Amino acid sequence: MTHRLLIIITFFQMMLTYAIKAQVRTSTKPIVGESLIFEERKGIVAVEAEYFYKQTKTDVRAWYRTTKIGEANITPDSDPVHIEGASNSAYIEVLPDSRSSHSDELKREENFTEKAGSMAVVHYKVKFNQPGRYYVWVRAYSSGSEDNGVHVGMEGEWPSNGKRMQWCDGKHQWTWASMQRTKEQHCGVPHQIFLDVDSIDIHDIQFSMREDGFEMDKFILTNDINYVPTGLGPEPTSANGSLETLWEKNKVQYQSELSYYNTISRSLDENKSIAAQQFNYDGSQFYKNGKNWLAINPKLYQEASVSSVFEFESGRYDLVFVGVGENDGRSTYTVLINDKELGTYSPPLSTHMWEEGQNFNGFWENVKLKQEDKITIIGKVGTEGLEWTRARWAGIVFVPVGKGKQIQDAPSTFRLVK
């Protein structure tokens, strides 16, 4: 190999690595700037968690944003999306989540830390019009015993009364709490989580990871010790204008967080789609894999089948089947309409743990479909010798005839091998 060719290959490897990391990290970036300042009025201020203006100390864990139009594809993350009931249809979560139950290995300074401010810190600017003691309430979603703790601080200081916020009650739903875990009371003591604001000024409010997998929707600072929020809590107030247009202003940023399947399925208003997890997979050999896919556990099964009904307008469509390329082998997918085979294909090997994109799709042009047609997917695992694939797939997109090729040209979704 010539020296020049080696330089070119190295350059492209570096660029690919950069692109992959950029894709994975998109939803960690702020969608507002430092100019957004929340304001305390009459002793209370509410803040949407997704409106952090920066985050720091993200080498090991970071806060990832989930919105009504997209979420981060970060693994491991054992629980589903909890967008229903979230204020502003968005929230943030510390990922990856490698300790979702007590039986999972606890790794200090990786999936757990008692050192407030040391990992995954999100920052918010808040203008206080009166100094004093402000009690901290957070609306969180906890699915178990290992995703229910966080730390709160201010101006880079992490006082003892801001450490170990704890949730025990209200599992599997968005729940307000303001309790501090202590040695004697693991489920927390009320009125012990607070920040002392000593001046009328703009202060930097910060939250940092205690346990990975923690999901935060909104927080409140109040100088009323007896205040208890309900429902979605009060509306946020800004010192520099209305918050009502923030969603639309940042729609481009939100759109960039979509998975490949969601990107192409929404690329044309005329598109119709059925996501894999919308198929009736209960009782089948498929299982729900992460937030987007169905998959097969190769230790239990080699093949699986699942069906759904075509509920859209009868007509002709280009059909795009979004499969997943894997580096362990080539899965095989067969698509049937009313039990008659439309076609079979196998995505090529990926150089990554998994990969979605145009090269890994099945594609059939000008397919005639009638409303109430039964669509069946048969998946088969594959292997290159050591490990088996899982026949992962994301869904089917039904596109106006002649446009099926063009919608597939969108950024791929990758998963890094670590």
Image (cartoon, rainbow, N blue to C red):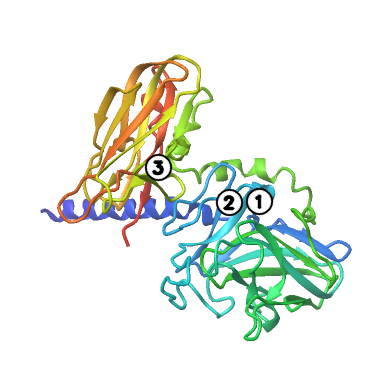
Which residue is located at x 49 percent, y 67 percent? Answer: 58
Q: Which residue is mark 1?
A: 86
Q: Amino acid at mark 3?
A: Gly
Which residue is located at x 35 percent, y 16 percent? Answer: 366
Q: Nearer the viewer, mark 3 or mark 1?
A: 3
Q: Is residue 15 left or right of residue 219?
A: left
Residue 176: image quadrant is bottom right
Which residue is located at x 32 percent, y 25 percent? Answer: 336
Report crowding for label 2: few under 14, some 14 to 19, many 20 or more residues within 10 A (C-alpha): some
Report if the CB atoms under discs 1 and 2 are less than 8 Å apart. yes
Residue 208: image quadrant is bottom right
Q: CA distance from mark 3 to mark 1?
A: 30 Å
Q: Which residue is mark 2?
A: 82
Q: Amino acid at mark 2?
A: His
Q: CA distance from mark 2 to mark 3?
A: 24 Å
Report crowding for label 1: few under 14, some 14 to 19, many 20 or more residues within 10 A (C-alpha): many
Q: Nearer the viewer, mark 2 or mark 3?
A: 3
Numbered badge on residue 283: 3
State whether residue 204 is above or below residue 92. below
Q: Looking at this rendering, what residue extends furthest in the front direction? A: 283
